[in-house]
Amino acid sequence: MKQSIAFLIIFFLATALGKPNDNPVPIDSKIKEVTVFLRGAQVIRTGTVQLAAGTNEIMFYDLPDNLNPESIQVRGKGNFTILSVIHQINYLKAQEKSQEVLALEKKLKELEQKVASENVTLAVYKHEEDILLANKSIGGQTTGVKTVELREAVDFFRSRLSEVKTKQLEIGQSIARLNEEISQVRKQLSTLTSQRKRPTSEVICNVSSNASTRGSFELSYVVSNAGWVPSYDIRAEDIKKPIEVNYKAKVFQATGENWDKVPLILSTSNPSMPGVKPVIYPWYLSFVEPYTPSTSVMTRSAPSMKKAERSLAAGEEFEAAEALSMADFTEVVEAPTSIEFNISIPYTIPSDGKHHMVDLQNFTMPASYEYYAAPKIDRDAFLIARVTGWEERNLLSGEMNLFFEGTFVGKSYLDVRNTQDTLDLSLGRDRSIVIIREDLKDFSSRKIIGFNREEIRTWEISLRNTKNAPVNITLEDQFPLSTNKEIEIKYLETAASQFQKDSGKLIWRLTLDPAQTEKYRLSFSVKYPKNKIIDL
């Protein structure tokens, strides 16, 4: 009998040792590093856990619900073997509240308590008003009231009722302001908590160990709702200096987990794009009906430019050094198919979907400066910086904020796919170059010749440099072009310009000395049937 009992005990112990735990052992992991792609991000978590002899189940918890299960990788260090990895969604546990949500909930509770307190005070004043109105009768039916007593009673009721009504009005206004603030807090909370109500996910690892040991694990996975967008600050301090470029990244993520003080790596790769090489199939031609879409041109004038003046205080001899930025702690690594920016300083990117600016690089590029004017469209001259060497920087397409002499002059866009070797940047208007384009009526005419009408139009363009230094300027205008054989155009005067007959464009490139004025006249004639109308 004793032998049977001993055998059962040994059997149950062996079964228990060889069977995995019913409840997985949670591993408290921390984010070690995040690689942010143009679309998506790879998160690396690390943690340690005590493993028992036999088969163990460990669980990484509070992970984003939208991570890509196919991207999950688990590595370990220790005397154990990873048998399997399983990903699952936990619908019973929502993502943790952020500090912003907790602060708003605390503020909402405080505001609601204030409203409740004000309502209590308001009820007290209303009750006092009811008492005053209920006791407004003075004296009895047979007993009169002396004049002095009546006056005192009336003054008391008037004064006290006035105070009570004033207090009720003040409290009502206070409650209205508090309710308005409560409404705003609730709207903000609704926006934030709508993202937080998503479930979490978990990664469960089946691990076998011959003996009790401490295991170190690393989990990596890819999430889709994150990325970064290139952005540039372009600064020109003087027309004799090179362009200063501040290369930045707008990093965003709404994964459900905050990246709190973690090293960031920004990569120019995009894992969401397919990596399969294309295949060329036979190309067959067939007839198609021609289609001409309607086109529209939308122009926007650049903002006015204001020169930023800077002066030193009297006797000033010391100039403080420039403050450091994140760009001073960024290492650029060129991979075979991408470029990576390794930021050594830990960075915090909350899961709010907002753009968080990260400095990547600061560098200069050579530039030449000249002015451009098209007075038919705009009477102002625009300063243009012609930048070279930009293609050597492996830049990406993105928005550019333009600054000249310390003043913001507008926005532009760098399109690396369509830009030539030279990048032209408009740095705003300069009204010190006066430009006038005048329609010369005395040299214009309109007459009928047989069945046709002939119009002659003449313009004169005048440029004057009011600056104290010579300027290089490119001036452009145009002649009309005919696409109808009934419309005949003759170019009468081109004012010694570089005339491009195929486009009708007239180009002048000149240097204006200080106080110098130049004038150019252009003239053309148009002949067309007199029963037709042309807008000139």
Image (cartoon, helix red, strand yellow):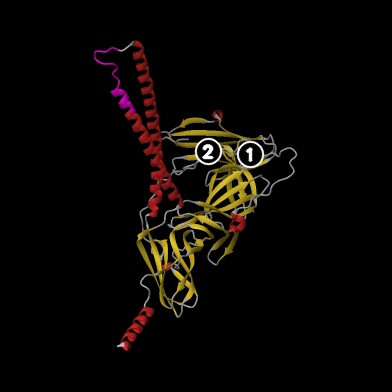
**Residue 487 in the figure: left or right of residue 466:** left
Viewer-nearest residue: 208 or 158: 158
Is residue 419 among what the camera can see? no
**Label 1 vs label 2: CA separation?**
27 Å
Locate residue 198: give its quadrant.
Answer: bottom left
Is residue 354 among what the camera can see? yes
Q: Residue furthest front?
A: 143
**In this rendering, is residue 48 above or below 53?**
above
Viewer-nearest residue: 508 or 53: 53
Magenta span has 140? yes
Q: Amino acid at mark 1?
A: Ala
Locate residue 54: give its quadrant.
Answer: bottom left
**In this rendering, is residue 157 above or below 291?**
above
Circle 2: is it few (<14), some (14-19), or many (20+) Cα within 10 Å? few
| 1 or 2: mark nearer the eye | 1
Circle 1: is it few (<14), some (14-19), or many (20+) Cα within 10 Å? few
In the picture, the quarter occupied by the N terminus is bottom left
According to the image, label 1 marks what residue? 308
Viewer-nearest residue: 521 or 100: 100
**Residue 69 position within the rendered picture, expressed as x and y whole percent measured from the top left:** 40, 66
The magenta span reads: 128-144
In the drawing, what numbered circle is on residue 377? 2
- Contact check, label 1 and label 2, Cβ < 8 Å: no
In the drawing, what numbered circle is on residue 471? none
Q: Residue at 53% across / 43% down in the picture?
A: 504
**Residue 341 position within the rendered picture, expressed as x and y whole percent measured from the top left:** 56, 60
**In this rendering, is residue 324 above or below 525?**
below
**Residue 301 position within the rendered picture, expressed as x and y whole percent measured from the top left:** 52, 40
Q: Residue at 35% across / 14% down in the picture?
A: 149
Q: Amino acid at mark 2?
A: Ile
